[in-house]
Amino acid sequence: MATDSTTPSPNAPPAGPCAMVVFGAAGDLTSRLLVPALYNLAAGGLLGEKFVLIGLARAPLTDADFRAQLGEALLRHATAAVDPAVWDALAQRVFYLEAHFEAPDTYARLRRRLAEVEGEFNTGGNALFYLATAAEHFGGIVEQLGWAGLTREQTDHWRRVILEKPFGQDLASAQTLNARLRRDLLEKQVYRIDHYLGKETVQNILVLRFANGLFEPLWNRNHIDHVQITVAESVGVEKRGGYYDRAGALRDMVPNHLFQLLALTAMEPPTCFGADAVRTEKTKLLEAVQALKPAQVPAHVVRAQYAAGTIGERALPDYRSEPRVAPDSTTETFIALKLAVDNWRWAGVPFYLRTGKALTRRSTEIAIRFKQAPYAMFRDTPVERLTPNYLVLHIQPEERISLEFGAKVPGPAVRMTGVGMDFCYNRHFGGERAIGYETLIYDCIMGDATLFQRSDTVEAAWGVVEPIFAAWNNSMADLLTYPAGSWGPQQAEEMLGRDGRQWRSTDHDSCR
Ligand SMILES: NC(=O)C1=CN([C@@H]2O[C@H](COP(=O)(O)OP(=O)(O)OC[C@H]3O[C@@H](n4cnc5c(N)ncnc54)[C@H](OP(=O)(O)O)[C@@H]3O)[C@@H](O)[C@H]2O)C=CC1
Ligand SMILES: O=C1O[C@H](COP(=O)(O)O)[C@@H](O)[C@H](O)[C@H]1O
């Protein structure tokens, strides 16, 4: 992550030289996210002349077909008007290799193609292998790259691999995958993407906390009552029933995206802005999250599945009637958790996390609730209750930070109302938004792994959720239902209610 400005800094040097090989280049991720991100980098002058893209997939395409396919995808998914000159220049450096991941000759052909582009475009022998493919292919591809000598680094060139999530389905499979990767790659060559770390508002958590003297003294159990992390989606399972029905909300979202938000919010200050310093603190934080005991699971975890309902004008069927979902599915589409971080900073401060599909609206936020001031001074006034003090990091779709506090209503009587101060990204930085993958691709080419997951972080995260799976396997938690378009089951409210707390309402949120 460039440390002096935005996504990445416009003053940053262009990335490269390098050849980026995308395994699964005819897929959705490539068209929807990777190509627009590469275009944005090129448009910002952040992809050097010595950058080449080689797409690899099974479809019988020529280079020209592939360029045309990506060009159309770019027009559909670009975040700003496409400048044909920028795209044409980039497209000249795009190539296609029709190949099967499993076929051994794929890797010999790839080696030859890499040597050709190295000669023609001076890519310097550097190569980034991007596995934009289902996780079941990761091990096989990396192994074959290793056999073909394609992952071997030399003093004059580097070789790196980007993996998309999921990194395993549980702790054991994550450990197996990491061990398999280690056979052919050094940890420093592995870049595990969590796309939440590509979001500006997520990267800003570190800056907010550690570049401002204002917040850090308050950032602990002496001043913070509790923390809420919400990742609410208004979409249902859409076309991904086949994958999602095997994963569920806990696997799909919690050990990755929600725990990244948790770790950034709660970690100790790293000693420097280096990849290992930041990732070590994140890992330590996740290791400090108390594993739930089986008997705690029913009170600390709420899981539920959506039933038919409407979200705005949109009607959603029961989750079990969605395409490629089992009619008797017991997969959760909503989960709420109460976690404790057992360290000096956070002892006694609950962290409430919730995520779900088919909820009222899309809203991702981290709400930090400060402890209440003593009421004594207002006892003989009309003030009946003090306004809760929240610092809210609105991650998406609104991108802002708000501070909520009480203010005196003008007039002779002492009356109080809740008011807020807002920092809105749009208003301050303008409306042009990035995909999020720009920074991640740029950083990988530049060899900065700060925003990527390390193997021990991934394993620490699975370690926290593992006891929950175990309890569910022993039928220790009911699967509830909630109507699509609601905020989830009532039991998620009750979980906080038992602690005398409630989820912060997002109903009136907007940039003031
Ligand atoms: N799509 C998204 O928004 C996101 C996706 N991801 C992750 O990214 C990865 C890719 O997802 P996505 O692009 O949606 O997947 P798709 O199914 O759309 O694309 C997969 C690609 O892999 C190719 N492929 C599959 N098997 C083989 C094979 N044996 N040999 C050669 N090529 C093969 C397919 O080629 P063919 O066309 O020939 O089938 C296709 O190009 C997944 O891990 C997913 O979890 C992560 C975040 C977001
Ligand atoms: O990884 C995933 O993330 C998306 C949510 O991402 P966002 O950037 O739109 O918040 C989620 O829909 C999907 O199920 C999950 O696999």
Image (cartoon, grey):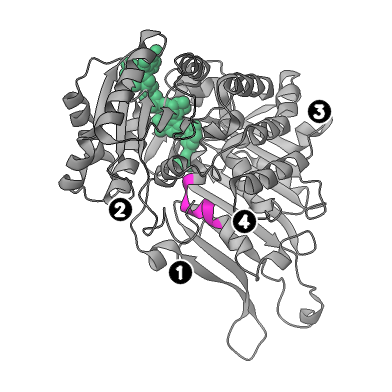
Q: Are marks 3 and 2 in contact (CB under 8 Å)?
A: no
Q: Mark 4 vs mark 2: give the one in front.
A: 2
| Type of amino acid under label 2 | Gly
**Badge 4 element:** strand
- CA gap between label 3 and label 4 equals 28 Å
Q: Position of residue 302 (x, y in %)?
A: 68, 35
Mark seen at residue 87: none
**Badge 1 element:** loop
- CA gap between label 4 and label 1 equals 17 Å
Q: Report the residue marked by disc 3.
A: 294
- CA gap between label 4 and label 2 equals 34 Å
- CA gap between label 2 and label 1 equals 31 Å
Left/right placement of residue 51 relative to residue 481 reads left
Image: 405 above or below 40:
below
Q: Report the residue marked by disc 4.
A: 367
Asked whether residue 256 is in view, the answer is yes
Q: Nearer the viewer, residue 405 or 391?
A: 391
Q: Position of residue 318 (x, y in %)?
A: 49, 26
Residues in magenta, as a range: 198-204
